[in-house]
Every structure is written in C-alpha cells, then in structure tokens.
Image: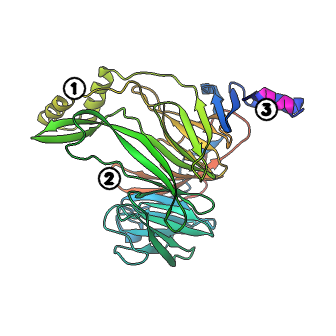
C-alpha cells in the first residue's frame, strides 16, 4: 500500500519552489492519495467557504432559446437534454414534439430532426427524445427511453441507424470516448410485493458496445427511498423528501456509480473494473420530524385546508432516513473535472458545488445559477434549461470565465443576447 500527500508528491518531484506555489494555491485544501490493491483512493478534507474558485459566471445568459408564442420552432416543451456541437450549434431534445431541434450559435432555429413515429430516426409517444449525447465522429446519439432505442444522426442530421437496447436497460446515461454506452434501468414498483413503510428501490447499470449489445454488467445499486402506505384499498407510493439517490455519470473514460448515502464516488473502467474511489469529508446530520413537517407545510401550502389535512394525515407516520444525503447532483466538464453539488439542507443557504480535478482532488468551491438545470459544462460556458412562472421553457448558455487564481467568485457582464 502506498500513501502520498500533496506535499509528498512535490518532494518526490524535486520541485520545492513549485510545490510551495501549489500549496499556497490550495490553501485550506488537503488531499491524501493512496493505492489499495490497484485501486486509487483519494481522501479530501471538507473545503472551507473561503476556498471558492476565482471562476466567474455571467450575470445573465449570453443565449436564451425559447418563446411563449410565435414561431413554433422556438416554443420548447419537455426539454430533456441539450448538447453543444463543436461548431457552436445547440441540439435540444424537445420531448414535447418528439424532435431534436437544432439552433445556431446566435439562437436561430436551423432544423428539426426526428419527429413522432416508429420509423427510422423517429421517436415514440412518451418522454422522447430523452437524451442527446456526443457520438464518435462528430455524430449525435439520441435515446428513446421507453422504446429502449438509440438513434444515431450525423452532424448534418442524417439518420444513420437505430438499435434497440437489450433486456431491461432503458436509459442511455452517457457515451464513452470509444463509443461504448453507459446504460441504466428505470427503477419501478411492483404492486403488492413491496409491503408498506420506507422502501428502497434499486437500479442496475451496464456497458454496451456501439451496436447496443451488452459488454459488461456493473451490478445493482441502491436508489431512492419511497414511503408505501395504504390508500383506498390499495397501496400508494410517496417519495421520501430526504431520500438518497443513485449516482451515475460518465467521467472521461471512466464511469461514476454510487449512492449519496456517504460522500464516496466510485469510478469504473469501461470493462467494469473499479479504478478509483473519491471521498470528501462532510458534516453528517439526521433529519427530524420538524424538518419533515416544515417540508410538507411548504410542499402543500397552496392546497385547500381539506386537501392538506388529508395528505398530512397520510404522511404523518412516514419514517425518516438515518441521515441526510451527503451530496446532490454530479456533473463533469470538458476538462475532465467532477462537479459535486452539496446537499440542500433544510433552512440552509443555497448549496455550493465542489469542483474536483481529473484525479479526484478538490480544487475548490463554486456557486452556480440556482434555477438552471445544467446539461453541459464546457471550457467557457454552462448549457442548461430554465422554466419561468408561466411554465415557459428556455435553453440557455451562460458564459464561464476560468481563472487559475482562487478569489471570491464574481460575475461577468453578459456578452450577447440571442433567441
């Protein structure tokens, strides 16, 4: 077994001056890297609030695509995903119309690919296209969740092929650089078999080769807790408000799988071998009945008194998990860094994101736009979607300026407006 701190790495490199600069740049951040039976384990301290990166996000998006009325091509509905192509075009998975809508770098609609149907390059009637992913050779892969299909389009929108995923694997979670696909199941309830009380679902993951055939099974992992209670002679499910989640994401040529019961992120190779475990210290807190009551009061504040009383009576005996989740969402960026969102604790301020480098060491903290559902983090932008009070959906691109120095994160003025 080999244990090495950041200081040890610098000493072995015989670069004392550079090491001093690195330590100063990582003030308040400590990482220990060790090897255990061929698996790299990275242990990180909890970053202090003052370790925010000096990267800045604009005050407003540079591009906003979407409209309340007018040209139907800009009326977005059920946006599931979006991707930015190397030439600046943005491809939007608009499930409401069963299309991939393509916009240029200024937000002008160029074309729509696909459409409703069962034919080549078309998408089914529900929640499709579900995702859009880069495919080797500048092509695009778009998934049809409940039909278990993946369709490949070239950069000009010409449909090349469609294949059906094997067995129970429905979700295309991501595409590896060599074209292998990371797949997941959709956790489901089986009526009459799960009993009542707090029940935890499971999810399975696998890797498939580019034609859709399975390459490696990655096993079963705990997903979310649901409360099952008797209602009207049957059983009804309700998501536990502080439920844990299964984590699944592509990280360069690795695959992240795990659960946020603990602050531990496991990374696997394309053949299913465990390659790395990344951990970060965090404060452990258990939810209370007061937390649950506050959540339910807020959740059902706009219901009638009668409706609220009925729902609260049904959920008053809901069990609580032993602890809050350790973190929220996980994203990756074009540099191969991991972005891990702190879990939003009741009564706490908006959570920060912890940014880790390609080796799993903490670089610092970052604040991201609260209402932006982020699909992609590039070298100099965030791509995501928002929905306003009227339910109007927009896909937005926010400028991101990276700086190697660590300062309080600031804001940039918007550089352009589109859409």
Separation of residues labelled 3 and 1 (CA atoms): 52 Å
Judged left or right of residue 168, residue 334 is: right
Tell which tag, 3 or 2, sits nearer the viewer: 3
Circle 3 packing at 10 Å, graded few (<14), some (14-19), many (20+), is some
- Residue at left offset 31%, top offset 67%: 125
Q: CA distance from mark 3 to mark 2?
A: 48 Å
| Circle 1 Cα neighbour tier, 10 Å, few/some/many (<14 / 14–19 / ≥20) | few
Say if residue 260 shows up in the picture.
yes
Q: What residue is shown with label 3?
A: 22
Q: Residue at x 63, y 70 (%)?
A: 137
Residue reaching furthest front? 37
Other-residue count near label 2 (Cα within 10 Å), few / some / many at <14 / 14–19 / ≥20: few
Mark before the other along the chain sequence, 3 or 2? 3
Where residue 55 sits: x, y (%)? 65, 41
Q: Main secondary structure of the magenta part?
A: helix
Disc 2 designates what residue? 390
Residue 260 in the image: x percent, y percent?
Answer: 47, 35
Q: Position of residue 268 (x, y in %)?
A: 59, 46
**Display coloring:** rainbow
Occupied quadrant, residue 317? top left
Instruction: Indicate whether residue 9 is drawn in magenta.
Output: yes
Q: In the rendered image of this protein, does residue 177 appear above or below residue 389?
A: below
User: Magenta stretch containing residue 303, yes or no?
Assistant: no
Q: Mark 1 to mark 2: distance in Å?
A: 35 Å
Closest to the observer, 121 or 264: 264
């Amino acid at each position: 077994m080999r244990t090495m701190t950041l200081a040890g790495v610098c000493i072995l490199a015989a670069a004392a001056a550079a090491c001093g600069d690195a330590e100063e740049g990582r003030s308040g951040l400590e990482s220990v890297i060790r090897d255990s039976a061929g698996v790299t384990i990275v242990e990180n301290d909890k970053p202090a609030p003052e370790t925010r990166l000096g990267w800045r996000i604009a005050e407003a998006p540079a591009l906003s695509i979407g409209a309340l009325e007018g040209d139907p091509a800009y009326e977005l509905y059920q946006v599931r995903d979006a991707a930015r192509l190397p030439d600046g075009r943005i491809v939007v998975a608009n499930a409401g119309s069963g299309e991939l809508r393509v916009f240029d770098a200024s937000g002008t609609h160029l074309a729509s690919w696909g459409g409703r149907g069962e034919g080549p390059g078309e998408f089914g009637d529900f929640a499709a296209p579900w995702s859009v992913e880069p495919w080797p050779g500048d092509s695009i892969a778009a998934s049809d969740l409940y039909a278990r299909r993946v369709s490949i389009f070239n950069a000009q929108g010409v449909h090349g092929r469609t294949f059906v995923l094997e067995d129970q694997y429905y979700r295309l979670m991501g595409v590896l650089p060599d074209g292998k696909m990371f797949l997941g199941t959709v956790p489901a309830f089986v009526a009459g078999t799960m009993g009542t009380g707090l029940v935890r679902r499971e999810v399975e993951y696998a890797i498939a080769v580019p034609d859709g055939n399975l390459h490696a099974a990655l096993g079963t992992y705990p997903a979310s807790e649901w409360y099952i209670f008797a209602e009207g002679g049957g059983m009804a499910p309700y998501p536990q408000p502080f439920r844990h989640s299964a984590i699944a994401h592509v990280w360069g040529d690795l695959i992240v799988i795990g659960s946020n019961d603990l602050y531990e992120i496991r990374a696997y190779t394309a053949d299913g071998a465990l390659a790395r475990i990344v951990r970060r210290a965090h404060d452990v807190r258990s939810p209370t009945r007061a937390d649950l009551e506050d959540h339910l009061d807020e959740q059902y504040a706009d219901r009638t008194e009668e409706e609220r009383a009925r729902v609260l009576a049904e959920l008053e005996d809901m069990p609580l998990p032993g602890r809050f989740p350790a973190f929220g969402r996980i994203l990756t960026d074009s540099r191969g860094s991991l972005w891990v969102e702190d879990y939003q604790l009741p009564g706490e301020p908006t959570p920060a994101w912890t940014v880790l480098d390609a080796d799993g060491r903490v670089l610092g903290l970052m604040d991201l736009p609260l209402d932006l559902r982020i699909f992609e983090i590039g070298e100099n932008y965030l791509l995501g979607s928002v929905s306003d009070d009227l339910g109007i959906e927009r896909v937005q691109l926010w400028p991101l300026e990276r700086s190697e120095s660590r300062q309080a994160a600031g804001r940039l003025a918007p550089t352009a407006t589109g859409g």
